[in-house]
Image: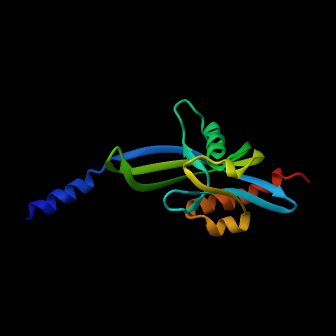
């Protein structure tokens, strides 16, 4: 048996798994009769996604969702309701080591209060308001599309009549 082949297969099976718990939100606003949500595009891929990030030690998922939306999308919001927790796996680097990430993201429905999507932080290339129907076409990840579809069913109960 080729020892190098065996060694490379052994290394692949010993990839460390890192647990990550994040929070984010579907931040929406209504202008006239149009519902828009805030999306962000991030470095280096430029793919569109919902604002989200890792929960800091001692922070609740709700507080983290509000903070991450403020940082990444530049807006302040009010938390209305939980939407869904999604789970996924991906490979990446941590401290120069190839690892497998197991990620849970708690998403919340958030109502726009104030601020500008132009005030996003340096991690974000662009933040913008997008019509709900367009957001579903733009989002890069199927899990986030599912979150937005669920949010679209919740939003009507929070709109002023």
* Horizontal and vertical percent position of residue 12: 26, 56
What colour scheme governs how the chains and residues are painted in the rendered image of this protein?
A: rainbow
Instruction: Pick out the residue farthest to the top.
Output: 58
* Horizontal and vertical percent position of residue 24: 61, 47
Q: Is residue 62 visible?
A: yes
Instruction: Pick out the residue farthest to the left.
Output: 1
Q: Is residue 137 left or right of residue 36?
A: left
Q: How many marks?
A: 0
Q: Where is 137 relative to 56, above or below?
A: below
Given residues 140 and 70, the one toward you in this image is 70
Given residues 113 and 7, the one toward you in this image is 113
Q: Residue at x 62, y 61 (%)?
A: 146
Q: Residue at x 51, y 53 (%)?
A: 87
**Quadrant showing the C terminus:** bottom right
* Horizontal and vertical percent position of residue 19: 43, 44
Instruction: Pick out the residue farthest to the right.
Output: 161
**Quadrant showing the N terminus:** bottom left
Q: Is residue 36 left or right of residue 144?
A: right
Q: Quadrant of residue 71?
A: top right
Q: Quadrant of residue 81?
A: top right
* Horizontal and vertical percent position of residue 3: 9, 60
Q: Residue at x 82, y 53 (%)?
A: 157
Q: Is residue 89 left or right of residue 128?
A: left
Q: Is residue 83 visible?
A: no
Q: Residue at x 43, y 50 (%)?
A: 102
């Amino acid at each position: 048996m080729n020892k190098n082949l065996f060694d490379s297969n052994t290394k692949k099976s010993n990839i460390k798994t890192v647990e990550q718990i994040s929070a984010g939100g579907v931040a929406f606003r209504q202008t006239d009769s149009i519902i828009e949500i805030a999306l962000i595009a991030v470095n280096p891929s430029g793919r569109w996604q919902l604002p989200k990030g890792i929960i800091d030690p001692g922070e609740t998922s709700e507080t983290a969702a509000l903070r991450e939306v403020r940082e990444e999308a530049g807006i302040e919001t009010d938390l209305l309701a939980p939407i869904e927790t999604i789970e996924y796996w991906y490979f990446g680097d941590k401290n120069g080591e190839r690892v497998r990430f197991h990620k849970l993201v708690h998403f919340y429905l958030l109502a726009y209060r104030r601020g500008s999507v132009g005030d996003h932080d340096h991690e974000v290339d662009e933040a913008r308001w997008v019509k709900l129907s367009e957001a579903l076409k733009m989002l890069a990840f199927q899990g986030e599309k599912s979150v937005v579809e669920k949010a679209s069913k919740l939003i009507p109960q929070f709109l002023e009549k």
